[in-house]
Image (tube, rainbow, N blue to C red):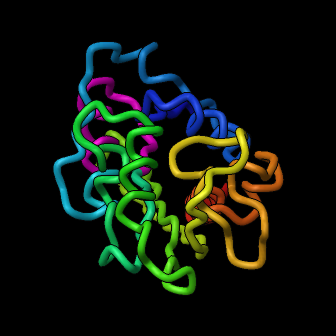
Amino acid sequence: MRVVFASRNRHKAEQVRLILTSLELVPLDEVAPDLVLEEPFDTFEENAFAKARAVVVATGLPAIADDSGIEVDALGGAPGVRSARYAGEGATDRDNNLKLVQELEYVPEDALTCRYRCVAVLVTPDGHEVVADGVCEGHISLEPRGTEGFGYDPHFVPVGESRTMAEIPLNEKLGFSHRGRAFRGLAHNLGL
């Protein structure tokens, strides 16, 4: 099945390709280069469906999308759905990480619990919709470590690990990460 991946994030695309090997993932820029994907909602699920539905309308093809982020308990679940824009519109990973560390600077180490959350969806032109989610629990390291990954990976230490997500090779990480769990769940729900 040909499915458009409703994202321009090359890191996500690489991960999804490794998980959904039975699908032909079509890059968004190949079929809808001018389409702007909006994330206006307060939940990962609503944002993922908004992106997938927009791609289906624009292309007439089935679409897969996700929305994901980090939820830090000491910040009341923030940045959450605003993870990519935590330090403002157009913020870089570095900007977002700096803001996160600054806000957590005086939080006791045992209170730096967090989780990565991902919701993955598929929408077809005939209106069929499938959803799956994945969570990876962890804690924040105020000192960044590693170069494998993106987003908050240099600061996220999964439960049971001493390494940050940015220190864990991708193939290993996909076995337990939020995105790995969400897209394997989506594949299961699709019977793939």
Q: Can residue 50 be found in the magenta stretch? A: yes
Relative to residue 100, is residue 73 depicted above or below? Answer: below
The residue located at (77%, 78%) in the rendering is 160
Quadrant in the rendering for residue 56: top left
Q: Can residue 61 be found in the magenta stretch? A: yes
The residue located at (52%, 79%) in the rendering is 113
The residue located at (48%, 65%) in the rendering is 117
Could you tell me what secondary structure mostly forms the magenta stretch?
A: helix
Outermost residue on the bottom side: it is 110
In this rendering, would 66 be left or right of 45?
right
In this rendering, would 38 be left or right of 190?
left
Residue 24: x and y in percent read 62, 30
Residue 105: x and y in percent read 43, 66
Segment tinted magenta in the rendering? 49-66
Residue 66: x and y in percent read 43, 50
The residue located at (49%, 82%) in the rendering is 108
Outermost residue on the front side: it is 106
Relative to residue 33, is residue 74 depicted above or below? Answer: below
Quarter holding the N terminus is top right
Quarter holding the C terminus is bottom right
Quadrant in the rendering for residue 12: top right
Residue 4: x and y in percent read 46, 31
In this rendering, would 82 be left or right of 14?
left
In this rendered view, identify the residue nearer to me: 149 or 66: 149
In this rendered view, identify the residue nearer to me: 55 or 99: 99
